[in-house]
Image (spheres, grey):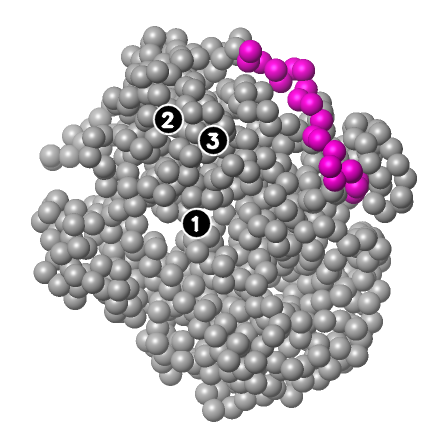
Amino acid sequence: MQYGADYNPDQWPEEVWDEDVRLMREAGVTVVSLGIFAWSRLQPAEDVWDFAWLDRVLDTLHAGGIAVNLATATASPPPWVSATYPDTLPADESGASYWPGSRQHFAPSSPTYRRLAGELVRRLAERYVGHPAVVLWHVGNEYGCHLWMDFSDAARDAYRGWLRARYVEVDALNEAWGTTFWSQRYGSFDEIFPPRLAPYSHNPSSMLDWRRFTSDMLLECYLMEREILLAAGATQPITTNFMGPFKPADYRRWAPHMDVIADDCYPDPANPHRVRDAAFQRDLVRSLKPGTPWILMEQATDAVNWRPANPGKAPGVLAAESAQSIGRGADGIMFFQWRQSRAGSEKFHSAMLPHTGTDTRVWREVSALGERLAALPALPAPGRDARVALVFDWENWWALEERDHPVDIEYLPIVVAWYGALHRLGIPVDIVPAEQIDDGYDLVLAPALYLLRAEGAAALTTFVGGGGTLLAGPFTDVVDEHDQFRPGGFLTQLGPVLGVRFEDFAALGRSSGGAMGVGALSVVDTGGEAETVRFDLDGVTVTGSLHAEVVHPVGAQVVSTFADGRSAGAPAVTRHRSGAGEAWYVATMPDADGVAALTAMLVEASGARPLVPDLPAGVEVARRGDVVTLINHTDAGVQLTLTGTDLESGVDADTWALTPQQVVFVRVPASAPHPPAPTQNRTHP
């Protein structure tokens, strides 16, 4: 288990470097990320290079037994780059440049930026590829974090090239984008521009490709640097740090190019759902590279500085949140950063070594965690421990949240709501695209899968036919990979397996508020309450939102009907036997009680089981191989039932009494079946 932080010795006088290493050893640090924002120190002018200080730092760390994750330092170009080469600057929708003075002020598709960054990486690689301290390469940093889209001329030129490679002929692009609408038909690729500031909404099919292009340009920057490292003879793993469910970058496409997945995760202490949300992120990054341990590259020891309000972590939370990553497959626990900065935008951001020194709670918790991780036995790699999958797809995210739909929908909250119900029950979950669904799962949830590719639909259909249980809807199987409707309407791919015919979306609007005419347009006043519908689910009154879709059973059993509104009497939830399995459809977005009730029914129907029966609220369980992690995130003591051996003490037990924020790693018999489902969850015959 690796332990450490970002280390920025270039921000400090050389006199403290030896002290840093001494304190790192005291805290149990084994590895540091070095040089992430050091470009201006390494190359203070175009033809001036200074590696002597980095030589000394690497040698000092190595002598102290500290390994290095060496960064390529390309995340923030020095001021001379943009002053000499303004074509490296990105631009906003209006074409105005983003200027230096912050970070990530580079156009990812700029040939000049790539040339300069490539030269820096080449020199670093040639100098340090064989240094004994270097155990990992860190390319760039948090790609796209602040610059979600670049609309510069460099992006324009690269976009046209990207489109030519994708479509070859402009007529094929016109067909994919449906450009006969609004007289948008293109005569050549040179007529196409990035979706800059426009009077109204852009073509949604073009916006989908633009998001693909944006993600690909960031990935190309990573791949360029990776290839330089490999050409220099790098044998160490190469990675960059992800940011969980980060909309601008399709990490599914990135993951195959990462030797190890690394992720930055900063749960908000003020978020009442922080445990669930952080667990979702950690399961997502684990699922990106199945079977391979990952690294928590950044988290905070206490407070951050970049939210409107920045409360610190309560005592014990630092270890509990770290254990959440370990339980979900992490073999590295790291922080931003080692020593708290004296100046700059992040000087209020907490660190392993605070401004106030070692006589602090943060230092004591940091050191205690380091000691505990050092003594922790080797853990099994995260395998196929989950029998339940949640479908999450970046391209669907992009298309679903584009404008001009029956109702505005936010994808991530919907997916996380369903995940939360499974998390609350203590059921392990993989988070994967539809194409990765196979017979290794018992239950699959695919909510709001608006854009469904043919390969994904085929995988879901095969899954049900082979004996699996599927939940779909609402607003699912609507468009193809170009954000166009398929012939025949909606649910054209999943309709037969779901046993329903789709008629209408029946979007729910507002219960009050009018419309104000403005010329030929209508501007809707959305000041009223959102409309809802109700239905009964095994004795639970459920409130639905977004849609009350009109679907007709074609072989499906109607589990529940809408009780009110224009859809009163119409199916709200259906269930259909298909092959050896069954498929459920929900025609609205249930509230929290409805999600919980429907999830319990699906768990019972599918045979999925929790790791621990009757899991108390606020207590979390996770499994990697034969190790189950128990975490009490509450302020009260709890007791759990699980037969196994405490991995750290060697004590065997059937019950575990956990104090507030306590973590226990329990080794269970590898062949032991999961415990039976709790009686109170058996809500469906």
Numbered disc 3: secondary structure: loop
Asked if marks 2 and 3 touch (Cβ < 8 Å), the reply is: no
Which mark is first along the chain, 1 or 3?
A: 1
Asked if marks 2 and 1 touch (Cβ < 8 Å), the reply is: no
Numbered disc 2: secondary structure: helix
Give the quadrant of residue 596. top right
* Nearer to us: label 3 or label 1: 3
Please name the amino acid that badge 3 sits on: Gly
Q: Could you tell me how far apart the alpha carbons at marks 3 and 1 are, in whole angstroms?
A: 33 Å
In which quadrant of the rendered image does the C terminus lie? top right
On whether residue 634 falls in the magenta region, the answer is no
Residue 674 seen in this snapshot: yes
**Residue 67 image offset from top left, x and y in percent:** 72, 71
Q: Could you tell me how far apart the alpha carbons at marks 2 and 3 are, in whole angstroms?
A: 12 Å
In which quadrant of the rendered image does the N terminus lie? bottom right
Q: Residues within 10 Å of mark 1 (few under 14, many from 20)?
A: some
The residue stretch that appears in magenta: 665-685
Which mark is first along the chain, 1 or 2?
A: 1
Instruction: Give above or below for 93 relative to 504.
Output: below
Please name the amino acid that badge 2 sits on: Val
Q: Which mark is residue 466?
A: 3
Q: Nearer the viewer, residue 550 or 462?
A: 462
Q: Is 508 left, or right, of 601 in this rendering?
A: left
- Number of numbered callouts drawn: 3
